[in-house]
């Protein structure tokens, strides 16, 4: 077993306090991929675990040098951990996999087969083994909402088990909870997308890190994704249009009041319409200015260097990066 061979596939596994699951996961990945004869590596990202997860990972790596370990300085969240995994992955196809054993590594070969003809292959946990009210119902609503807003229809955005071609993820900058929106965010590239039914299993060890409160954050990130997909490179078109419309309404109201004052001698100083007209004009001008500032920021963003959203404590498995 050697790491000299350039891996064709990288398995990115973010883990957080999964000490019981790590050895079992390693064995399941070996059983699923070794018979395929595909050169692969496993990039395990320890997202600031407070138990013995890192020590278990080191034990796995001592037995199988195809494992690359990335330890983050603190718990940055799944999106940051996944981004760290992408940055350290070397394969042409990158598969993401949860570390809690609810995703089945035996499904990876099917995803890889479909990935030969598609840029992104998303898993679909058709028969989820989670509580209905606390997990499955919010997920169903979120999947419907995300599909409607983004126009990219998937049954299961929240399934971590996905396969990406390298050129898809290497141009993505992930923030917040945006790892679940990768297919939608990447859609501007003109990707080909497929969905594959996968197995889903009850959690055996540890505690779920997901809860109903995450739904609110998902909705807020969805607003960001919609803005990025539609107006990321042209903010003036949303802020400027809204501001121009508001200012125009304010000017019409102001013109009407001016006619009343000059033509009919009406008293307009205390009329609420006057204050509304002033408010609409001022807010409209501010929105137009925000759009212009947004245009300037977009140009700065696209010309600046990409900044990481995580800090690495240590890396095992890549020459020149260990320490």
Image (tube, helix red, strand yellow):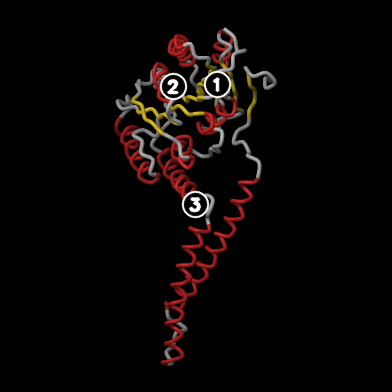
Sequence-wise, the earlier of marks 2 and 3 is: 2
Q: Residues within 10 Å of mark 1 (few under 14, many from 20)?
A: many
Residue receiving disc 2: 112
Proximity of marks 2 and 3: CB atoms separated by less than 8 Å: no
The answer to which quarter of the image holds residue 115 is: top left
Sequence-wise, the earlier of marks 3 and 1 is: 1
Residue receiving disc 3: 231
> Residue at position x 48%, y 13% from top?
26
Quarter of the image where the C terminus is located: top right
Q: Is residue 311 left or right of residue 241?
A: right
> Residue at position x 54%, y 14% from top?
56
Is residue 300 depicted above or below 317 in this figure? below
Q: Residues within 10 Å of mark 2 (few under 14, many from 20)?
A: many
- Distance between mark 1 and mark 2 Cα atoms: 17 Å
Q: Which mark is residue 12?
A: none
Residue receiving disc 1: 43
Is residue 138 depicted above or below 197 in this figure? below
């Amino acid at each position: 077993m050697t790491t000299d061979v350039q891996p064709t596939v990288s398995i990115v596994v973010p883990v957080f306090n999964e000490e019981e699951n790590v050895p079992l996961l390693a064995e399941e990945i070996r059983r699923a991929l070794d018979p395929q004869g595909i050169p692969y590596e496993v990039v395990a990202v320890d997202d600031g675990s407070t138990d013995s997860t890192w020590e278990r990972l080191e034990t796995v790596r001592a037995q199988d040098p195809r494992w690359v370990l990335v330890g983050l300085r603190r718990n940055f969240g799944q999106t940051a951990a996944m981004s760290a995994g992408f940055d350290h992955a070397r394969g042409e196809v990158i598969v993401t996999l949860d570390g809690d054993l609810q995703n089945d590594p035996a499904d990876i070969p099917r995803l890889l087969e479909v990935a030969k003809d598609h840029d992104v292959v998303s898993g679909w946990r058709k028969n989820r083994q989670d509580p209905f009210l606390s997990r499955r119902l919010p997920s169903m609503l979120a999947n419907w909402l995300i599909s409607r807003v983004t126009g990219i229809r998937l049954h299961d955005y929240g399934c971590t088990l996905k396969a990406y071609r390298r050129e898809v993820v290497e141009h993505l900058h992930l923030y917040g909870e945006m790892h679940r929106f990768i297919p939608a965010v990447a859609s501007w590239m003109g990707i080909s997308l497929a969905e594959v039914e996968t197995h889903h299993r009850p959690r055996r060890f540890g505690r779920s890190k997901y809860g109903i409160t995450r739904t609110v954050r998902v909705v807020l990130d969805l607003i960001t994704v919609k803005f990025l997909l539609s107006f990321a490179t042209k903010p003036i078109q949303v802020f400027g249009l809204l501001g121009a419309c508001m200012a125009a309404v304010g000017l019409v109201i102001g013109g009407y009041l001016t006619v009343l004052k000059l033509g009919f001698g009406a008293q307009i100083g205390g009329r609420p319409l006057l204050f509304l007209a002033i408010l609409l004009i001022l807010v409209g001008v501010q929105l137009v200015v925000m759009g212009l500032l947004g245009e300037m920021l977009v140009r700065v963003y696209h010309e600046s260097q990409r900044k990481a959203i995580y800090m690495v404590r240590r890396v095992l498995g890549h020459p020149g990066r260990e320490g």
